[in-house]
Image (cartoon, rainbow, N blue to C red):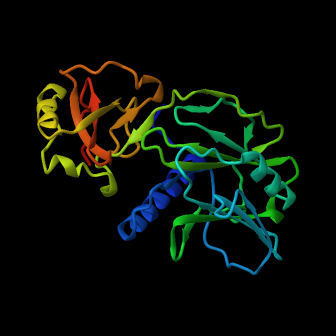
Amino acid sequence: MNGSLTGFEERRLAELKEHVAARAAAERVRRPRRRIVLAVAAGAAVAAVASVVTVSSIGGAAPAYAVTKDSDGIVYVTVRDTVPGDVPDVEGLTRQLQSLNVPAIVDYVPAGQKCKEPRGAIVTDIPGDLYHTPRNIPGDPGAWQMQINTKLFKPGQTFVWTLHVDPINGWNGTSTILMRDPVAPCELVPDDRPHYLARTPPPWVKATSLGGYQVEGKTVGEILPEIDKRGLKVTYLVTEPAPDKPRDPDMPYVMYPTKQNTPVGNDWFVWQADELAKGAIRLYVTQKLATPQHH
């Protein structure tokens, strides 16, 4: 990468940061059992909500995804927390969206995999109100809602919505992108992309069982005795310095899902730790520390 961003990429990055900030605010109120994270291709500002005239859902009494459409042609997709291990009914969701005049394809991608690219030509001149990024639903911290304006699609366009499992934390996530037809089916291949990591973990995965013990800059060999003494389990997230100048200096490391089986030595460095489950410490390890970035 050359470090520069196109206008299209800048919009994607800005919307991702906006969503992460909203998610962090929601977590200060309530920590759900599963969170939804998001990477988006485009979107815009808030629009007025009209009355619902059609209601349909995917799943049983408490569906993970519900689709509604109002009299102005706005389709609302509500995404709720799902039970870990559940595979969403993407074929049913695709049919529901298409029946409401959304030219959509919905795919599910397990952790550590991705859809083989390219699938089709990406549309970059997207109307601002075509679709909006998922937003919190007041009174329901475990749910998000996005909206799609069916009147703004042009002939030969397909709304490609991918439901995936985040390879870092196991969260349910979504990515949305608008493509020109034809769009190739999702062929699952190993995820060899760099996933950028924040220097500071979110507060809801703070390694509280370490009781203030500082791990940053120590080696695995120095830390393991302390973990053993506390009776904790340990796993590793294999990382390395970002392959290019970080877009954000607070995200200096990346992880590759295809490298997670790399043997970790006692001489590896630890730069962060988190605790996804009580008593289970995950060390973020690297063979080489990243060069500090100066603002």
Seen in the image, is 218 located left or right of residue 155?
Answer: left
Instruction: Where is residue 205? Give x, y as percent.
Output: 32, 51
Q: How many marks?
A: 0
Image position of 222 with respect to 73: above or below: above
**Is residue 187 or residue 130 the one in the foreground?**
187
Q: Quadrant of residue 44?
A: bottom right
Question: In the image, 99: left or right of 90?
Answer: right
Q: Does 76 sit left or right of 195 as displayed? A: right
Q: Choose top left, top right, bottom left or bottom right for residue 229.
A: top left
The residue sitting at 40% across, 68% down in the picture is 30
- The residue at 72%/62% (across/down) is 130
Residue 292 visible (yes or no): no
Residue pictured at 13% horizontal, 50% vertical: 212
> Percent from the top left, x then y, of residue 203?
30, 57
228 or 5: nearer the eye?
228
Residue 170, x across and y down, in percent: 47, 43
Q: Is residue 239 above or below residue 58?
A: above
Q: Is residue 51 above or below residue 125?
A: below
Determine if residue 8 is in view: yes
